Image: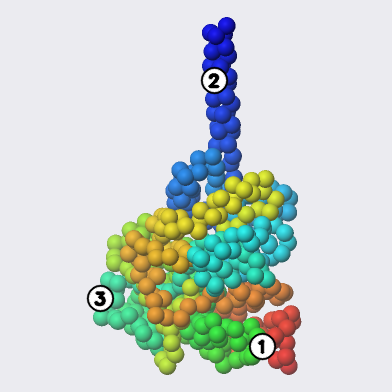
Amino acid sequence: MKRRRGLLVVLAVTVACVLFSSLAAGAQTVELTLGSWRVDDVEQVQKLLDAFHKQYPNIRIKFVPTNPPDYNAVLRTQLTGGTGPDLMYVRSYKVGQDLYADGFLEPLTDMLPILEENYSVGSLEAWSLDGVPFAVPFMAVSHGIYYNVDLFKEYNLEIPQTWEELLQVAETLKQAGIIPFSNGSKDEWDMNEIVYMNLLPNFIGGREARLEYETGQVPFNDEKMVSAFKALQDIAPYLPAGQEGVSYYDAQQMFLLGMAAMFFGGSWDVAFFEASEPDFEWSVFATPAPKGRETVICFHPDAGIGLNAASPFKEEGMTFLKWLTTVEAAQILADEIPGFYPLNINPIQIKSKHANDFYALSEGKEVDARFVWPLLQAGEPNGYLLTQTAALAVVKGSMTPEEAADYVQEGLENWFEPTMKFKK
């Protein structure tokens, strides 16, 4: 009888162990998806996810990026149709705010204390609406000018400290038969986002100046805005011949092959340039302001990560978002994706020299986000498309700087209430 009772106990323990193992195995099979526009970072993001998986083996996250130009439209279609990813990269300001306002993103109100502890007010504002956070600030990018150090040495050129000096450098290079800047406008966003918004804050000022436009203190066709478009006109002669047919990739290759001495670009190009291993020394410098003005760096909050409000795995998703706020996650991001900077305010070491050099450009300088991101994409005509059309027209010579600024002002005054009072 005792033996039988013992066998029953052993059997019960065995069954319990099997059931526990099955439950554990089942928990480990919970898989979430992470949507993104960063198709170039699959291997690098996987290392970030592997670190999370190591701590939370019952939660698996699959990275499913989308081609960058298609991401916004594809994501919204997926979310509308109920097939969106559980977690997703969220663009800053208006695009992300629209997703939240439409009910697609889970509010992160319960995470507010940990978010306020690890991120600046400015970073949180980029992914909040009416004080409610809807994504964890993930990474930022910086803008500047890449340059061929060897060519600068060969022609005894110093890093320009003013816009006027930059144009003198460009003229020296052009006279020597070297293309000064490799940028073109076949990919229209390049001339707008990478060139115009790169130089813009140096001519109008940083955040406080941007707020003057956004609150209607000054019109979008004031002298400062005209001077920014004039700067585009200034560099037009130093772009490649037939720049209208030069794509973003072409511009990168032209620089990497040593055909052009400089390239208006962003810190996100660092990893690609390092992997390309050009046969010359290269570095970066800050896009300079005109003489008498302070240099301002376009340092843009690029991506947050949010949780699908319809995800069946909200608890697991929140676990991942809380882990993203740790220094460990921020350090992995800095190590694996050089040129994308963690927004966590805790000290992070950047091991890539080029990424570190790019980051250092903003030290001691005022920084601001890309000009149209916070408010100017909310209506039609969209502020981004207005500046893009104007920038392209100035570079091609079909608009004067004054006409370009008027075009932006007239477009915005159709819907942007603060600037309507300047309507003629």
Q: Which of these two is toward me, 145 or 48?
A: 48
Q: Which of these two is toward me, 86 or 371?
A: 86
Residue at mark 1 to residue at mark 3: CA–CA distance? 48 Å
Tag 2 secondary structure: helix
Residue at mark 1 to residue at mark 2: CA–CA distance? 74 Å
Residue at mark 3 to residue at mark 2: CA–CA distance? 77 Å
Residue 91 visible to the viewer: no
What residue would you read off at disc 2?
A: 14
What residue would you read off at disc 3?
A: 154
Residue 186: percent from left, percent from top: 54, 68
Q: Can you name the residue that lies furthest to the top here?
A: 1
Residue mark closest to the camera, 1 vs 3: 1
Q: Which of these two is toward me, 71 or 149?
A: 71
Residue 232: percent from left, percent from top: 50, 82
Of pointers 1 and 3, the one earlier in the residue sequence: 3
- What amino acid does circle 3 point to? Glu
Category of crowding for the residue at label 3, using alpha-carbon neighbours closer than 10 angstroms: few (below 14), some (14–19), many (at least 20) = few
Residue 156: percent from left, percent from top: 25, 80
Residue mark closest to the camera, 1 vs 2: 2
What residue would you read off at disc 1?
A: 216
Q: Residue at x 43, y 65 (%)?
A: 346
